[in-house]
Image: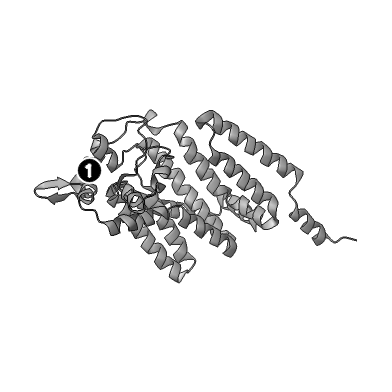
Amino acid sequence: MRTTSTVAKKAEKSASPKAALWIAALSLGYLLLSYILIGFKADQLLLVVLFTSLYYLSPITRKFALGFTIFMVFWVLYDYMKAFPNYWFNEVHIKDLYEAEKAIFGVVVDGVRLTPNEYWQLHHYTLLDVLSGIFYLSWVPVPMGFAAFLFFRNRTQFTYFSLTFLLVNLLGFVAYYLYPAAPPWYVQLHGFEFIPKTPGNMAGLARFDAFFQIDLFRGMYAKGSNVFAAMPSLHSAYPLIVLYYGIKNRLKVARVVFAVIAAGIWFAAVYTSHHYILDVLFGILFAATSIALFNCLMARRGPTYRAVQRFIKAIE
């Protein structure tokens, strides 16, 4: 006679028909909605295939796929921003942000006051070009790699980190629609005139591509969801969240590495003219706010806390 534990193990090894139907329906719905809103892209099909494959491969990959749905939500929302440009809803801030940056952080060179971006545009160096490119390439792999590490080390910390990451993005996306803002390179190329549907630009990162004779950043920025989403800099927010959870999990060597990466990304954002110092500071502020808000929600042990605990139990 089969024991209860044997039955439970067999059930765990195979996905239920109900789950299979849900996955099929959600996958088809996602692909159809994506086609309607922004057109079909290979990335969308890859996301569906990757999730489905992991879900059916084994019990552990199934839990891994379920855990990383948090990051999938972020990716889908980011992608769908292309369908609803933020400049449809509010005026784009170009000159006022530029003038504020110059007034607060301006550098006087030969009697002329420049923004830090303009200063670095005139004084760039090959070593800094290469280092900036390396740091900027880490903005997605480091959080994702750290999340994968936490998944196999501590599912609770994995979930807390992932949800904090999602929260800072949600707050950032709201800010993008409330305060559309042009990046420094936009002013360098187009002045203060607002030009809808302006394509993304590599700005100072073009020097990294040129040095290695590749088209890495060109391809990346061609897929950007919105040029006028510079404030706050979420590039600057992510490494602070990684650093916080590195410290929280007592990862001695890793937290030093994370601190260097954070400082490197913050510098690179300004050096390459992708963000003003103000953008970086607000990115750091949004990260700190997201950490504090999520910790507050967990400390209250209300409905949000209970929902999070159910999610953790589902992937353990």
Q: Quadrant of residue 159?
A: bottom right
Left or right, 218 with respect to 17, comes to left
Q: Position of residue 244 (x, y in %)?
A: 43, 61
Q: Quadrant of residue 60?
A: bottom right
- Nearest the viewer among 224 and 143 is 224
- Nearest the viewer among 74 and 79 is 79
> At label 1, which amino acid type do we have?
Ala
Can the viewer see residue 295 in this picture? no
Q: Position of residue 16 (x, y in %)?
A: 75, 47
Q: Is mark 1 on a helix, strand or loop?
A: helix
Q: Where is residue 53 in the image (x, y as percent from the top left)?
A: 66, 48
Disc 1: CA contacts within 10 A as few (<14), some (14-19) or many (>=20): some
Left or right, 77 with respect to 62, comes to left
Judging by the rendered image, the residue that carries numbered circle 1 is 100
Please report the residue visible at 52 percent of the width from the left and 57 percent of the height from the top.
147
Please report the residue visible at 57 percent of the width from the left and 32 percent of the height from the top.
33
Please report the residue visible at 58 percent of the width from the left and 44 percent of the height from the top.
47
Please report the residue visible at 46 percent of the width from the left and 43 percent of the height from the top.
170
Query: Is residue 30 shown above or below 15?
Result: above
Can the viewer see residue 257 in this picture? yes
| Residue at the extreme right of the image, as rendered | 1
